[in-house]
Amino acid sequence: MIETANLSLRSQTHADIVRWTCPHGRHAAEGCVTCYHASTDADPALPLWEVAAWFVSARPMPIRALHDVHRHGSRFALDQPSTPLVFLLSGQTRAATGVEAVAGLVGFLVDNRHIVDEFTVTEIRAVHS
């Protein structure tokens, strides 16, 4: 199962907002620190998700910050495609739903503001492994 959302500047429908809201009331694209912390000690019986979040940053990110992600969350990778100020955070995580998996992935960024202090998520994806 693949769950994906392109988050454009247009407003999302109410149904889309509900669909992408985690159990803690946070939209997955905004991130949820609670979902992130829950994923660090997740039950191995929970589904494994391949997750990705594309985001833009207000400022360039130092190469060192890209490498720091591995030190703080070895299951995640932060890459910069060829487009300036566009980044891809991806990895694997266990969660009950794709929404919780993505909210936890983006929650990693929220919890680690020293890596990237300002960002806007433009696309999110969760694929059940």
Image: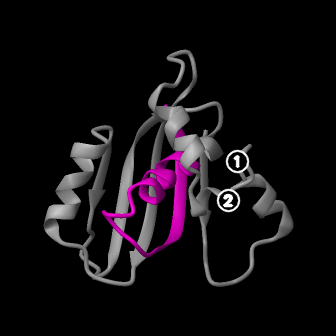
In the drawing, does residue 88 fall left or right of residue 124? Answer: left
Q: Residue 25: where, in percent of width, then height?
A: 75, 52
Question: Is residue 110 found inside the magenta-colored segment of the image?
Answer: yes
Q: Nearer the viewer, residue 22 or 19?
A: 22
Q: Nearer the viewer, residue 8 or 116?
A: 116
Q: Residue 88: where, in percent of width, then height?
A: 36, 62
In the drawing, does residue 127 fall left or right of residue 5? Answer: left
Furthest residue to the top?
45
Circle nearer the N terminus (2, 1): 1
Q: Residue 89: where, in percent of width, then height?
A: 37, 56
Give the label on residue 27, or none. 2
Q: For the magenta stretch, what is the residue range?
A: 101-129
Residue at 62% x, 56% y: name it.
28
Q: Are marks 2 and 1 in contact (CB under 8 Å)?
A: yes
Amino acid type, callout 1: Cys
Give the label on residue 22, or none. 1
Residue at 74% x, 43% y: name it.
23
Q: Residue 85: where, in percent of width, then height?
A: 32, 80
Q: Quadrant of residue 128?
A: top right
